[in-house]
Amino acid sequence: MSRAWLNSADSHVNEPGDLWEKPLGAKWGDAVPRVIEPVAGGDGSIGGGGRVYFTGEDYLPTGDLDLGDEMVRRARRTNVDPVYRAACMDEDGVWAELLFPTKGMMVFPLPNTDLARDCFAVYNDWLHEYCSQVPARMLGAALIHMEDVDLALAELERNAKRGFRCGMINGDTRPEWGCYGDPKYDRFWAATTEMGIPVAIHISTGMKKDVFVFTGDKLRHAPRGYLDLMAEAGQVVANEFIFGGIFDRFPELDLFLVEYEASWLPHWLYRCEQVAYDFGPNLGVVPPRRPVREYLDQLYVGVIDDPLIRTVTSELDPNRLMWGSDYPHVRNTHLKSHRTVEEAFGHLDAAVIDNIAVNNAATLFNIDMPTGALAAAPSP
């Protein structure tokens, strides 16, 4: 069956370079994340001579988002004009997008947690205004800093009331905070289930650095860094949400792993079962209350064009997979999204593809689809 529309559960805005300078400059001065002129380092100019985004910790070359003159022109306009973005979505056959940040992802690792929280509040206000211009089609993921549970709860509640569809948390905690499995975080998990707000963990928001901020000698370790980055979420899910008991204490909690693709999951599942049933007993590890595989019913996994998706659907219910375009980042599928979905997932049954590319996101994020747009209703 031909799909009239897709839903992207992983798209991005590229925030204005001065988003935080104006409201936070007087309070935080030069510590505020911002776009600056080329920076010379021991390895020469960072960013290939172009302007860079500086968080106070890391430099992100803004040119890394450039995909050709026409795509750059479109992307720049969509970042400031949501109505134009909707027209571009029409052209690509995408009905709705769940919007994650670009520069905001680099704020998660800031040592100054008060500054990071201030940045997140400003971003959430900006994104709310952006999405409010096309509210049925542009859905916000609120940035939630998890160092202080009371403040995290307050920001979650503030944005849930404004219609944000999920809370994007730190990809992992820092050692001094305690682990997510610590009962002190239980109030947060309870609130997400009461509000019906899924929790999202996106790449580049945890303890592993995004390789795009590697410079100089660190670039030698980019391959290792990339693999570490892509493995981080699986480790957090296993240690905290499964073995740490979060999923047991909150069986209605929905956790969405974004931009990790999915073909890592079968091997990860095999290793989790080894920990639970083989090595764990010899190490004194308390096994999960339920079979490891049952916890997959609380997990959603984002995919873009994973060519090994068939290996996943034999282990994970396809209703837990959600396609995303990653627009406007390097791997985005803009203007070829329908073709990408067919090429990556076309070997699956049509109803399964419909659910991955359209229906699963519509159900989880309460997307109001146009009449007749859903190619097939999600199976129970």
Image (cartoon, helix red, strand yellow):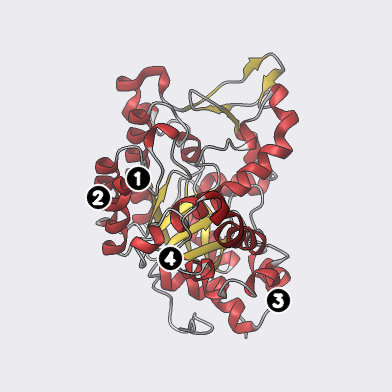
SS at circle 3? loop
Q: CA distance from mark 2 to mark 1?
A: 10 Å
Q: Is residue 102 left or right of residue 134?
A: right
Identity of the residue drawn at 50% across and 42% down? 205
Q: Name the quadrant containing residue 337.
A: bottom right
Q: Of discs 4 and 3, which sits in the foreground? A: 4
Q: Is residue 113 left or right of residue 42?
A: left
**According to the image, label 4 marks what residue?**
289
Q: CA distance from mark 4 to mark 2?
A: 34 Å
Q: Of discs 4 and 2, which sits in the foreground? A: 4
Q: Name the quadrant containing residue 45.
A: top right
**According to the image, label 1 marks what residue?**
124
Circles 2 and 1 in contact, beta carbons < 8 Å: yes
Where is 257 relative to 155, above or below?
A: below
Q: Of discs 1 and 4, which sits in the foreground? A: 4
Q: Earlier in the sequence, mark 3 or mark 1?
A: 1
Task: Decide: few, some or many residues near mark 2? Use Cα within 10 Å; few <14, some 14-19, many ≥20.
Answer: some
**According to the image, label 3 marks what residue?**
346
Q: Earlier in the sequence, mark 4 or mark 2?
A: 2
Residue type highlighted by circle 3 = Gly
Q: Please give the label number shown on residue 183.
A: none
> Can you give x and y, in whole percent of width and height, for residue 86 in the image?
48, 60
Q: Earlier in the sequence, mark 1 or mark 4?
A: 1
Identity of the residue drawn at 63% across and 54% down? 332
Residue type highlighted by circle 4 = Arg
**According to the image, label 2 marks what residue?**
158
Task: Decide: few, some or many residues near mark 3? Use Cα within 10 Å; few <14, some 14-19, many ≥20.
Answer: few
Task: Decide: few, some or many residues near mark 4? Use Cα within 10 Å; few <14, some 14-19, many ≥20.
Answer: few
Q: Is residue 229 left or right of residue 54?
A: right
Residue type highlighted by circle 2 = Arg
Q: CA distance from mark 4 to mark 3?
A: 37 Å
Seen from this angle, which residue lies furthest front?
A: 282
